[in-house]
Image: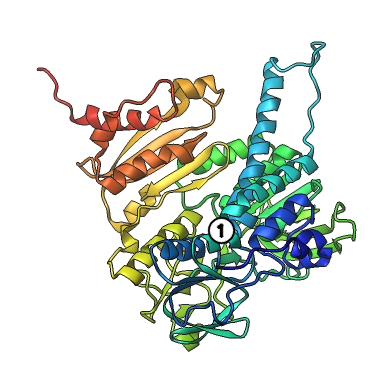
Amino acid sequence: HERPLSMASSWSDAPPEEARALDVWPLDESNVKLLDAVRPRAWEGPTEAEAAGEYDIIAIGSGAGGLVTAKQAARRGARSALISGHLAGGDCLNVGCVPSKALLHCARAAREARAALAEGFLVAADGTAPKLEVDFDAVMARMRRLRAHIAPADSHEGSAAAGAHVYQGWARFSGPDTVVVNERTLRFKKCVIATGGRAAVPPTPGLAAAPYVTNATLYNLTALPPRMVVLGAGVIGMEMAQAFAAFGSQVTVLARSAVLSKEEPAAREAVVKALEADGVAFVSGVDVKEVQTLRQQPDDPRAFPLLKLVLGGGGGVPAELECEALLVATGRTPNVDGLGLDAAGVAHCGKEGIAIDDLGATSNPRVYAVGDCAAGVPRFTHMSGEMAKLAVQNALFGDGWKVSSLVVPRCCYTEPEVASVGLTRRDAEAAGVAVDTYSSSLEHNDRVILEGQAAGGGIVEIHCSKDTDTIVGATVVAAGAGNIINEVTLAMQAGVGLGAVARVIHPYPTVGEGVMQAGLGYIRRHWAKLN
């Protein structure tokens, strides 16, 4: 096991430039606690004598996929090692799921407070209507504090306590069964690549030299940009557009194609309607011809650069837009460069990722790949973790768990949320799968009405194989949709038909009754009637 981190090597004693090099800023008490957990300044890995002569399994990357691989393998008796190159916890903890949901909570609170003012039941002590403003600095401080609170679960010390050897450094393959880290060669029986992905940045003229932000740097902001342009209309773009609009930024989304293009049309319409109500402007069918930097990032981190975007796209599209913050959210690209994959005999495509078979194995049978670095799989934290379980089971225990057997839900955490699992109607048509669709509009759901959300376009849509109650896909648009979809995901995974789901008693009043109501559509179509 690794020796504990000494306080003398804490990030509290680090020069700020070290933290900036890791894209973590400001170096306040919360970020010191975060970095001490996920990127200790002087982590002492195993000595030569302590290291295994040959590891049963090595995980490269310390996000969800790597952490689950290394910890679970160690707990099941394997000689396990974890190689952490950047920040343990990966994107999810540091620059993804965790900080974004912290911001969305504050945005929702601000939105609900304004609604309470509008409805007249939130007043000052003297009966007047108070003037509310969002303290953005406090929002970000709260995010950093809560992120640091979660960080120990992903820490080096936590992995070591589970029985894994932790190496802090960048790994590369030197052969089909060896990796090099910190100039040390480690031998393995099996290896799991879990290096994740990063924001894809388009080759727009002027963009590379501009002070844009991605999810990797957005959460370092300490002041609210007056104007934000979001390039891209996927999940990250929609969530942050709504959040920053709620905080008070003037937000414009530039979308070349449909908003949340993978989702059902009703879901996309509900999200656009909600964001527009929050003040977000959408410019569709637009191309960014050039990004001009009118003012670079000042030395003061609370000051802003100034950018101009030159646009093209035909009628109705403005010729140019200026902003103080440009969020690039145009997709993801796998982290496969510099790994020495060719030396390991691992086939890969830089854009798509590492090729795997249905058991998660690469072209080298000793090596598996999981999560965002693997080609052809959904890029979600929960998918990375589940694939890691599959890889451990197959690699160490000779099982035959299949990637294609996984039922993987997804969620966009806007307000309303959009959660889906399985096929959409368009997916079914493309695959030649005939379906029957059972829907329940939530505008008449009593809980939705009482929450003041009846006009939000909420809906539950469940698709079944034609003339059966076998569920092949579903979409829920509602507050808390990410929780509601789990019922349908379980039904699909367990082979429970929609008729049985419809007979599950749901507490009243809940938004989840919408699933039952959609199921009643199937029952009504098939129930017996008296002559």
Q: In this view, does 514 lie to the left or right of 49?
A: left
Q: Is residue 500 left or right of residue 37?
A: left
Q: Is mark 1 on a helix, strand or loop?
A: helix
**Residue 478 appears in view:** yes
Q: Is residue 127 left or right of residue 492?
A: right
Residue at the top extreme?
127
Nearer the observer, 202 or 346: 346
Nearer the observer, 500 or 393: 393
x, y percentage for residue 480? 50, 35
Residue at left 40%, top 20%? 508
Quarter assignment of residue 192: bottom left
When the figure is inspected, residue 149 is found, relative to residue 294, above or below; the finding is above
Residue at left 63%, top 75%? 169
When the figure is inspected, residue 179 is found, relative to residue 161, above or below; the finding is below
Q: How many numbered discs?
A: 1
x, y percentage for residue 516? 33, 30
Nearer the observer, 460 or 214: 214
Residue at the left extreme?
531
Quarter assignment of residue 453: top right
The amino acid beneath tag 1 is Gly
Residue at left 37%, top 73%? 361
**Residue 281 appears in view:** no
When the figure is inspected, residue 234 is found, relative to residue 341, above or below; the finding is above
Q: Name the residue under label 1.
A: 158
At label 1, counting other C-alpha atoms closer than 10 Å, the crowd grade (few under 14, some 14-19, many 20 or more) is: some
x, y percentage for residue 159? 54, 62
Q: Is residue 107 left or right of residue 68?
A: right
User: Which quadrant would the C terminus be assigned to in this image?
Assistant: top left
